[in-house]
Image: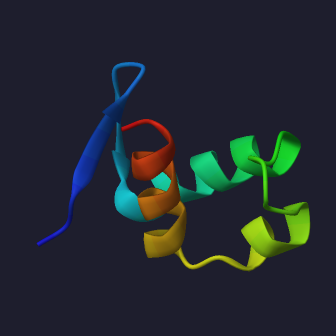
Amino acid sequence: MTTTYLVDGKPMTEAEFAQRLRERYMEDPPEGYTREEISRMKDDDILDMDYFLNE
């Protein structure tokens, strides 16, 4: 089963959403992370990081 996210009214797959988050966090990395670390993160790690940063 594929998870679908609704972002700005547009359905996205989990991989598409993770890539969008990765690009956003690479532009402005959260404290304690580097752009390189974020670029190497797996999709699940990006999604988890976003969840905990916005909890």
Give the residue drawn at x 54%, y 63%.
46
x, y percentage for residue 38?
Answer: 74, 66
Give the residue drawn at x 43%, y 50%.
52
Tell which residue pokes out farthest to the top in this image. Answer: 8
x, y percentage for residue 28?
Answer: 83, 39
x, y percentage for residue 4?
Answer: 24, 50
Report which quarter residue 3 is drawn in.
bottom left
* Relative to 34, residue 42 above or below: below
Q: Is residue 20 left or right of residue 37?
A: left
Tell which residue pokes out farthest to the left in this image. Answer: 1
Tell which residue pokes out farthest to the front in this image. Answer: 32
Q: Is residue 10 left or right of residue 26?
A: left
**Quadrant location of the C terminus?**
top left
Give the residue drawn at x 35%, y 56%.
13
Q: Is residue 18 left or right of residue 7?
A: right
* Relative to 54, residue 14 above or below: below
**Quadrant location of the N terminus?**
bottom left
Q: Is residue 40 left or right of residue 8?
A: right
* Relative to 37, residue 33 above or below: above
Q: Name the foreground residue: 53 vs 4.
A: 53
Give the residue drawn at x 73%, y 47%.
25
* Relative to 26, residue 10 above or below: above
